[in-house]
Amino acid sequence: MQSYVLLFTLTLVGYSCGQTTAPQLPDVEDALAADGRFTTFLQLLKATDLLDQINETDHFTIFASTDAAFAKLPAGTLDNLKASPAQLDDVIGYHVVLNTSFRVHGTQQDTVLHSSTSQPIRINTYNVVHTVTAEGVNITVKNISVNHGYVHGIDGLMKPPLGNVVDLGSVRTDISTFESLLVQANLTTYFTSDHSTTTFIPNDDAFKKLTPDVLEYLNTHPADLAEVLRFHFVKQLSLYSLGMKHAFSIQSTDHNHDLLMLFEDDNGGMKVNHAKILEKDISSVNGVVHIIDSVLIPAKVLVAIEDSKVVIG
Ligand SMILES: *[C@@H]1O[C@H](CO)[C@@H](O)[C@H](O)[C@H]1NC(C)=O
Ligand SMILES: *[C@@H]1O[C@H](CO)[C@@H](O)[C@H](O)[C@H]1NC(C)=O
Ligand SMILES: *[C@@H]1O[C@H](CO)[C@@H](O)[C@H](O)[C@H]1NC(C)=O
Ligand SMILES: *[C@@H]1O[C@H](CO)[C@@H](O)[C@H](O)[C@H]1NC(C)=O
Ligand SMILES: *[C@@H]1O[C@H](CO)[C@@H](O)[C@H](O)[C@H]1NC(C)=O
């Protein structure tokens, strides 16, 4: 029986190797050159040794920034990249996946691929706006089929996450109040345990807009402090800005599941409830973070603070 199975397997392998009728897909270099929309990316790719690595893999996926995307980058970005081989390896290496052939299906939600630089690349599908993103960047050209893999054209350069939402506190200096309150409320595990999350982090200036009395109230009422923090946090959804739409509402993780409502303002910016989004789309290993200019306080906690006769700033 065993030898029969072996023989059968060998026959199958022999058959697939001997098959000559399957159409020969182009090699990635030829395909990108022929396409014409990826001339800069191809030039950068050839300056690394990634094409050799791709040639040695059975499966790969490339997220190739289009020429239009490079044209939108701040002046000097491309020249700086070209001048620094190490940085080029990091940046272009992050756009190459060496062990998976990934096709866009229109259903992939928070699918995470692993780049050749061992960093995560998060894929999201936002059906309401007919958009699929890689690390929050729009995938504008889908499923270019090449020998051993796929190329997808993207509308920017992806930036890898710098850690989780708690780690973010050590790489930037303007969110220390929120980060220290997370520790104080013993919520760091809660904020980092889910795989797909969205966190709206009020910056330090936002906390300064509260009266000292409100901060004092929160410092002395741990349950209400936890509710305030959780009102800024969404689980089971990584909502990058490209997936946001006017009047969209999402449930926060406070105990009432109070809604976070998105509004487009007159200047093309976005607000979440009354807070303005100052900086969007900061990737974290478990989702995405947006920095906001005001602290969001759930209605129940507002009432409790008012009842305690504190003036709200
Ligand atoms: C890929 O590898 C094969 C040998 O495995 C070699 O013949 C071919 O030239 C390589 N192609 C590129 C583009 O490096
Ligand atoms: C690809 O490699 C990463 C580590 O480099 C691993 O975590 C992941 O599971 C691999 N994926 C597949 C499909 O092999
Ligand atoms: C990409 O390929 C997948 C699998 O074949 C298919 O389901 C999907 O519709 C394709 N997407 C586009 C935009 O062609
Ligand atoms: C993303 O790109 C696609 C294809 O070009 C486009 O139809 C879609 O509107 C873009 N999404 C957003 C949110 O800009
Ligand atoms: C902190 O939270 C964890 C769960 O995230 C819990 O196991 C632990 O008991 C909590 N510690 C305190 C002091 O409340």
Image (cartoon, rainbow, N blue to C red):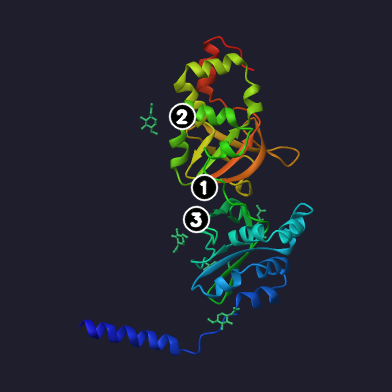
> Which one is in front in this view, the residue at disc 2 or the one at disc 3?
3
What residue does disc 3 label? Answer: 112
Sequence-first disc among 1 and 2 = 2
Q: Mark 2, residues whose alpha carbon is within 10 Å: few (<14), some, or many (≥20)?
A: few
C-alpha distance separating marks 3 and 1:
10 Å
* Position of 232 relative to 312 (above/below): below
> Which one is in front in this view, the residue at disc 3 or the one at disc 1?
1
Query: Cβ of disc 3 within 8 Å of ligand 2?
Result: no
From the viewer's perspective, tell me whether residue 290 is left or right of residue 7: right
What residue does disc 1 label? Answer: 285
Residue type of the residue flagged with mark 2:
Asn
Identify the residue shown where x is 43% and y is 36%. 189
Tell me residue 299's x, y (percent).
53, 23
Question: Camera-side residue: 267 or 63?
Answer: 63
Quadrant including the N terminus: bottom left
Sequence-first disc among 3 and 1 = 3
What residue does disc 2 label? Answer: 256
Give the quadrant of ligand 2: bottom left
**Circle 2 SS class:** loop
C-alpha distance separating marks 1 and 2:
27 Å
Q: Is residue 51 visible?
A: yes
C-alpha distance separating marks 2 and 3:
30 Å
* Position of 126 relative to 206 (above/below): below
Query: Cβ of disc 2 within 8 Å of ligand 5?
Result: no
Question: Camera-side residue: 288 or 132?
Answer: 288
**Circle 1 SS class:** loop
Residue type of the residue flagged with mark 3:
Val
* Position of 196 relative to 62 (above/below): above
